[in-house]
Image: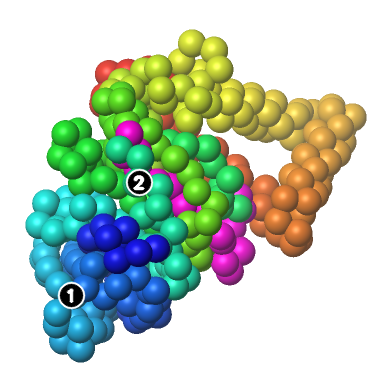
Amino acid sequence: MSANEYPSVSVILPFQNNASTLERTLKSIMNQDYPEGQFELIMVCDTSTDGSVEIARTFQQSHPSNVTLIVNSNQSKGPAPAANQAMRNARGEILARMDGDAIVPPNWLSNLVRNFAREEVGGVEPFVIQTDVKAIVPFRSSAPSGFGPGVGSSFRKSALSKVGYYDECYYHPFFGYFREDADLVFKLEEHGFQIVRDERVKVFHPDRKRSMRLIVTQGRKYGLDPLLLRQHPARSRALLHVKIGFLSSWGLAFIALIIVTLASLMGLLSTDIRIQTLTVAFIAGSYLGVVGFYKKLSGKWIPQSPILLFLFLATFGIARISGSIIFRKPLL
C-alpha cells in the first residue's frame, strides 16, 4: 500500500475488568504494520474494579501521541455507551472495534482498510478464531454478514454518523446488554451500505468457559431478542432462527424441554414399575445422546453438558417470554 492508501483509523476499545488480558491486547493493537501516525487507540474504562484502569493508564502514558484513555464510573450499561462515547470523539475515517480480551495480528488494520476502497462499503466483519475452547457451543466464527461478533469489526465513520452509532436501548437491568452489534449492521444495510466479511481480517478471541453462572447470564441476554425483532422484523428473522410465526428453533426446543421434563417427572412418579424403568432408560439415553453430541461438536467429553444445556434452554425460554412482554413483541 502506498502512503496515500492509508486512511486514518481509530481503534475503539471499551473494557471492563480485563486485567488478566488487557496488556496483551494493547500490545497487539500497537504492533500493527500500519503507519503509526495514521491510527489512534481510544480506550474507555467502564467501571472496572480489578486494576484494568491502572494497566490502561500506564500504557497510555507510554504512548501519549496516539493513545487516549477515558474513564467512566458507575455506568455499567455495557460496551455500547462506552463505544459511542469514543466513536463520537474519534478522529479516524475508519472506526475499528476491539475487546479487552482479544488479540489481533500485525496486518489487522492493513487488511481491513482495503475493503473501504469502495464507497458503498459501510462495515467489515472479521474472521474470528477462537482460542481456549472450553464452551458448550463453540464460537460461530463462520457466521454470515450481520450475525457475527462485534470484536474486530470496523465501520466507516461517515456511515455511522448517518445511522446513529450503537443503539443504547439494547440494555436491560435483568437481561444485560446484547444485540447492539446486529442492530447496527442491520441499520447500515437498511441505509444502503454494504457489510462485507473478509477472512483476511483475523481476530483471536477466547471462547466462553463453562460455568452455570455464565450459562444463566448468557441465557438471560436473549430477552433482548424481541426488541431486535421489533426494530428489524424482516432482517432479524434469520439471525433469531424464527421458523413459524413467533416461534424460533430454540423456542421449539424450549417447548420440547418442558414437555419432556413433565413427562419424565410423571414417569418417575408412576406406580407402574415398567413405566418407571422405561423413564429411567429414556433419561439415561437422552443424557448419553447429549454428551455424545457435544463430544462430536467440541472434540471433548463434557459430562455436565446435559445439565448446562437444560439450564440454558430454561433460562433462554423464560428470558424470551419476559422480553416479549416488556418489548411488546411476541417471540419464543
Which residue is at the front of the view, 47 or 269? 47
Three-letter amino acid code of the residue under disc 1: Asn
Task: Report the disc number at residue 53.
Answer: none
Residue 250: percent from left, percent from top = 56, 30
Q: Under tag 1, what secondary structure?
A: loop
Which quarter of the picture shows residue 26? bottom left
* Residue at image coords 84%, 28%: 275
Residue 138 lies, with reference to residue 2, above or below; the image says: above
Q: Is residue 135 shown in magenta?
A: yes
Q: Position of residue 203 (x, y in %)?
A: 48, 62
Q: How many marks?
A: 2
Mark 2 crowd level (few <14, some 14–19, many ≥20, 10 Å Cα): few
> Which residue corresponds to the image point at 37% horizontal and 33% vertical from the top-left?
194
Looking at the rendering, in which quadrant would you find the N terminus?
bottom left
**Quick check: 23 above or below 183?**
below
The numbered mark at residue 66 is 1
Task: State which tag comes first along the sequence, 1 or 2.
Answer: 1
Q: Secondary structure at mark 2?
A: helix
Per the image, is 136 magenta? yes
Magenta span: 120-137
Give whichever of 247, 321 is nearer the camera.
Answer: 247
Residue 222 visible in the current orientation: no
